[in-house]
Amino acid sequence: MLSEYPREAVERRPEAMRIGGSQIAWEGSALVVRFAERAAVSGRRVEGSLRLTPSATFDEPLRLDGRGRHYWWGVAPHSRVEVEIVRPRSLRFRGHAYHDANFGGEPLEVGFSDWRWLRARHDDRTIVLYDSHRRDGSEGRIARVFGGDGRLQTIDAPQEVELGRSRWGIRRTTRCDAGGRAEIIRGLEDAPFYARSELATELGGTRSTAVYESLDLDRFTRPLVQHMLGYKIRVERGA
């Protein structure tokens, strides 16, 4: 569910942000999202709340490119979450959570042709791997361990392994310990330019379940894909 709003429907302050009828704000040590939206096609109401409680937060955005036009920020990679949905039907659940952000001075497709990202949670830490191919021909590589105690460690990127292509033909590769194995458990999202999966892997000497994504920005820029995106996005023209 994606919605676009005009500028006048957005209000941003240091501790909170409102977009239309939805709001995200820090309330004590928890990041709380209260959402009130409509589905793009059916128009039905989707309402509820999400409360994310970090084990620790990290204030160190990383530059993803040589020109300083793109940044990635692992805000709270090791967290807990409680979700309550009231519409279209009542649903509650809780579990592990992850919070990061990308920001910069130009569209992602200008700076990158593709990237692959993975987040593997262990009991006391979260491992994040981030590989990208930039438009200038260089490669980016991030391999970090975010401790639940607030410690941050940079590690050597493990070996690269193939995961096979998605149903739309998106190439999927990841990294795991030497001699280990990584395999797709199930697909979570499969689109013409993007694939998200749950996989089993070995990192830091531990077998774990991870969330993985592969993004193809060459595919994203194709006219047909841009046309198809219009059917996934609800545009709010009034404030």
Image (spheres, rainbow, N blue to C red):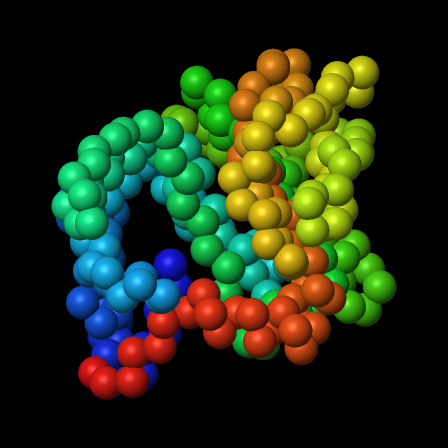
Q: x, y (%) of residue 59?
A: 42, 50
Which quadrant, please, contains the N terminus?
A: bottom left
Left or right placement of residue 83 versus residue 120 in this view: left
Position above or below: 170 against 121: below
Q: Residue at x 74, y 33 (%)?
A: 163
Position above or below: 180 against 109: above
Q: Residue at x 41, y 33 (%)?
A: 78
Which quadrant, please, contains the C terminus?
A: bottom left
Q: x, y (%) of residue 227?
A: 58, 76
Q: x, y (%) of residue 51?
A: 23, 41
Residue 125 seen in render: yes
* Residue 14, quarter of picture: bottom left
Q: x, y (%) of residue 117?
A: 62, 44
Q: Residue at x 49, y 26 (%)?
A: 121
* Residue 213, quarter of picture: top right
Along the viewing direction, whichever of 182 and 41 lies nearer the viewer: 41
Left or right placement of residue 167 versus residue 77 in this view: right
Residue 17 seen in render: no
Q: Residue at x 56, y 19 (%)?
A: 208
